[in-house]
Structures are given as structure tokens and as C-alpha cells.
Amino acid sequence: MQATSYRLPCRQFAGARGPRTFYASLPTQKKKAKVEIDDLFADPESQVAPSTGSNATQTHGRLRKRGLTSAARVEHFNQLVGFVSPRLGKKPEVKTPRVRKSAWTHLVGLASTQEQLEKVVELLPKWKDMDCEFGDKFGDLIARRCDELSCPLLALKVFGDYSRYGVKMTLVAGRRLIHSLHMKYPIEDTIAAASLYSVYSLPPIAQDLPSCSMLVHACYKHNSKHSLQVAEALVPRLRTLLESRPPLKVKKESPRLAQDPSPKWLLSSLKQLDQVLYERNGRKAEEWLRTWRSQSGYAKPIHTETATTSSP
């Protein structure tokens, strides 16, 4: 799956509202494996089961705790797909029992390969055709599984075409998408993900510290004329964000990071950015960046007499 190239104005990341559609053309044991059908389908009289408040991450964790073997997991997945597929669309082949919204969470959580996840994605439009909606947490799960299965472009495809898939990108999902793209994929893909913030009415990229930091690092890493323009336009905004925030005191083993890894992504991208700017400035550290990192406990403090030789 390859992305199209883009040339986007830097102002788009500062809060300007972009077009409402974007990136749409991108391309155990047998007993344990048994699908609990009653839990996944609604009663015949009901339309769509109400969305539960369960966290997508917790659901995925429960699936792993069941201890399914790889073969049982595949069997479980295929069986569930077999039940869901004929019950979708404007004119479903099987009308009852109706599919519960929780079935989608199970499908995405059970998918263990990119191909399986793509199979789930292919079914999403049929759910939307039934005038059914996905909860916001579902977008977070899509972004997470695409990240875990090393196929973030699939998440970009889904979020980039809301009219087709009907899956909303939250700030949590947006941060994870940028994280999964910004180091290993073309800069155009990361910029495309950043541009979706305005489509989903999220805070502008220049106002979200983790997202802004990762994007700036990606732009410098790419080192093209256009990416450097974007980076240089965002650096002053990144500085403003850092100087307005207290130092980040998060231990690497903190349980908090399991639920929200964005602080870890922020610290990592700032470390890399510190190194980049140190080299670009003739081996002189950016005081505002190094000071914030040192106050957070992740870098040595700057000393005026050694600032030109002290690396991150």
C-alpha cells in the first residue's frame, strides 16, 4: 500500500481548517476457542446494541489472557467473520440475530496478521450501510492494532475516508498513528496523518505537544526542502508548548504508560530532536529544549562553558 505525495501549507498545522475529506484515495484449547455467539449478537427485536463503555485496550488484554493457541485464535477469528459477514449490509442475507457492536471489538482484537485486519476493514462499510455507528473507542483500537501489526497505512486509509468506513480518529488514535508512521514511513504519510487532525476537529498539530514533537522530528529526519520548511515553521510553536508546560516526571516503568504511552513517545522524539538540532547548530545545544529535558530528568543540564561540546 503506497501513499500519494502531498505538498501541504505549514499553516494547516497551526489551526486552519482543511477540507472535510482527505487521503481518501490511499490505497489453547478448542473449548476456549468457541465463539460465544450470544454475547456478540443482539436480540431479534433490537436494532443495534448500545455501545458499552469498555475500553478497547482492556478487551484486547482479556483476549490475550484466554491463552488461545495460534491455531485456535485463527479458528475463532474465522468463525466470527463467518457469522458477522452475512448479517451486514443494506440487505443482509441473514437478518437475525443482529450483530452487536461488541463483535467488532472482538474481531479487531482477534486479528493477528495484517491480512486478517484488512479483512475486518473490508467489512466496515457494510456496517455503516446499515446506518450503524462505531464508538469513538473503536478508532483507538484500530490505530492500536495497526500499530501492533506493523500496518499503520491501513489505519491511515480508514481514518482518511470517513465517508466510506465511518471510523472516527480521536486524539489518542491520531497520536498513535503519527507515532507508528513517523520513523519508518515516508514523510508524506506522517504529514497526511497530521492533516487529519483538522478533519476530525482535533486540536491543531501545533497545539498538541506529543504530536508536534514527533512531526518535527520526522520532518528533520526526512531532510527534504519541503519537510525542513514544515519543521522550521513548527519549531517555534514546539518551543512555546514546552516553555508553557511543567517538566514531565514520568518513570519508564510507570503503569500509566501502559494506558497512555504518549509521554514516552514525547520524551523519545524530544531526545532525537535534541540530537538533530545539536548537530545542525554546530554542536551547540538548544537551551530551551535541553533545559526542559534536563528538568524532566532525561538529559544533562547545559553549562555555558560546555554548551558547544556537550551532546544530548
Image: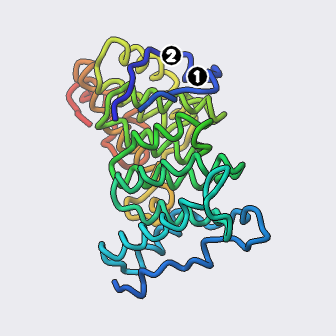
Quadrant for the C terminus, please: top left
**Residue drawn at x 42%, y 80% as measured from the top left:** 33
As drawn, which residue projects farthest toward the front? 93
Residue in the picture at 50% in, 30% down: 194
- Label 2, secondary structure: give it: helix
Q: Residues within 10 Å of mark 2 (few under 14, many from 20)?
A: some
Q: Residue furthest right?
A: 45
Amino acid residing under circle 1: Ala
Residue 240, compared with residue 172, is above or below; it is: above
Q: Nearer the viewer, residue 122 or 66?
A: 122
- Left or right position of 221 against 231: left
Q: Are marks 2 and 1 in contact (CB under 8 Å)?
A: yes
Tally the numbered discs: 2
Q: Position of residue 49 (x, y in %)?
A: 72, 66
Quadrant where the N terminus lies?
A: top left
Give percent across and percent down for residue 301. Answer: 34, 39
Judge whether residue 114 can be spotted in this image: yes
| Left or right side of 52 for 287 | left
Give the x, y percent position of residue 59.
Answer: 52, 69
| Residue positioned most to the left | 309
Q: Could you tell me which secondary element the residue under label 1 belongs to?
A: helix
Q: Name which residue lies at 36% across and 46% down.
A: 151
Residue 81 bears which disc, if any?
A: none
- In which quarter of the view is residue 55 placed? bottom right
Front residue of 30/139: it is 30
User: Which residue does the numbered mark 2 point to in the structure image?
Assistant: 10
Q: Quadrant of residue 288?
A: top left
Q: Quadrant of residue 280?
A: top left
Q: Is residue 6 above or below residue 131?
A: above
Q: What's the amino acid at mark 2?
A: Cys
Q: Which mark is residue 14?
A: 1
